[in-house]
Amino acid sequence: MSTRGGHGGNDLQVNGLAFAYGEQLILQGIDLTVAGGEFVALLGPSGSGKSTLLRLLAGLEKPARGRISAGGHEVAGPGPDRAVVFQNYSLFPWMTVGDNVAEAVAKAHPKLDRAERRRRAWEQLDRVGLGEAAARHPFELSGGMQQRAAIARALALESPFLLMDEPFGALDPVNRARLQDLLVEVWERGQPRRTVIFVTHDVDEALLLADRVVVMGASPGRIIAEHTVPFPRPRRRAALLGDDSFHALRERITDALDADTLAHLDPA
């Protein structure tokens, strides 16, 4: 399935993508266009290949067939233009939080001196409410604080593309809501806005955060539906839950996932 065309220098294009682990086909026939500055959620159940697709976009895996381009350049491996946030935080445990973020600043601006790198790192940590934790190590922080630090590090790369693999999936509901709100605030204030690809299996999270939801089915992973999210920003959880159109869209997405799962059950 093909999607709407993008614009600007931060477009992302996927054409005829397939991927396999050995003989097992994981993704097949993926065509996707994401416009510069767009926030897209990849939504699907376990086994739909959404995290694998994100790794391909990041250049951490290589496709069996097809082509991926980011900002008009073919993706051949990892690059500083694509910042990645994983579910498990992936901070360097031997570094302080400030040094973790300063390392990202150095990658974005290798000619900066140490003092300026630290200043910019602390600035990013302040944005996510961690300015006072800069001297602490990751193991000294709660899960929510570690994920905020991981987001600060990703933002410090100043990458036009932000790729996020279920970054809030392991958090409690309160911290999850806080980080969702923080992500949207940082994204909306960006000039220019980053292009965000956000992997989730939570329909409500996708509809709260994204401009567009790309629904993936399994066996093998492929795009089965796409939905533009019509609700104006800023979005409030209570208002969405009281909106009949929100419930109708959520039901359409859930029904599509359920139907795809049933269609691919092994009859044996």
Image (spheres, helix red, strand yellow):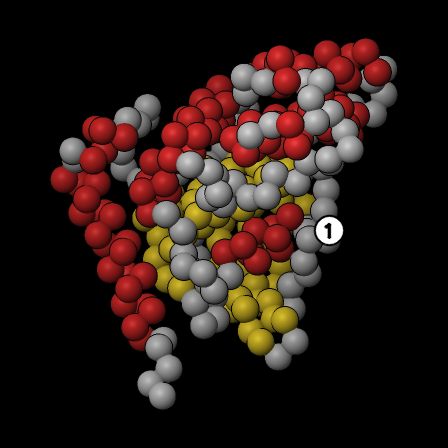
Q: Residue furthest bottom?
A: 268
Q: Looking at the picture, tell me which residue is in the foreground, 78 or 99.
A: 99
Eyeballing the image, is 243 above or below 136?
A: below
Q: Residue at x 77, y 17 (%)?
A: 117
**Residue 210 on image: x %, y %:** 39, 38
The amino acid marked with disc number 1 is Gly
Quadrant containing the N terminus in the rendered view = bottom left
| Left or right: 6, with 133 as reference point | left
Eyeballing the image, is 135 above or below 74?
A: above
Is residue 194 in view? no
Query: Dot 1 corresponds to which residue?
Result: 77
Are there few (<14), some (14-19), or many (20+) residues within 10 Å of tag 1? few
**Residue 244 on image: x %, y %:** 14, 40
Q: Residue at x 60, y 67 (%)?
A: 19
Quadrant in the picture for residue 109: top right
| Left or right: 245, with 49 as reference point | left
Task: Give the structural element (helix, strand or loop) at label 1.
Answer: loop
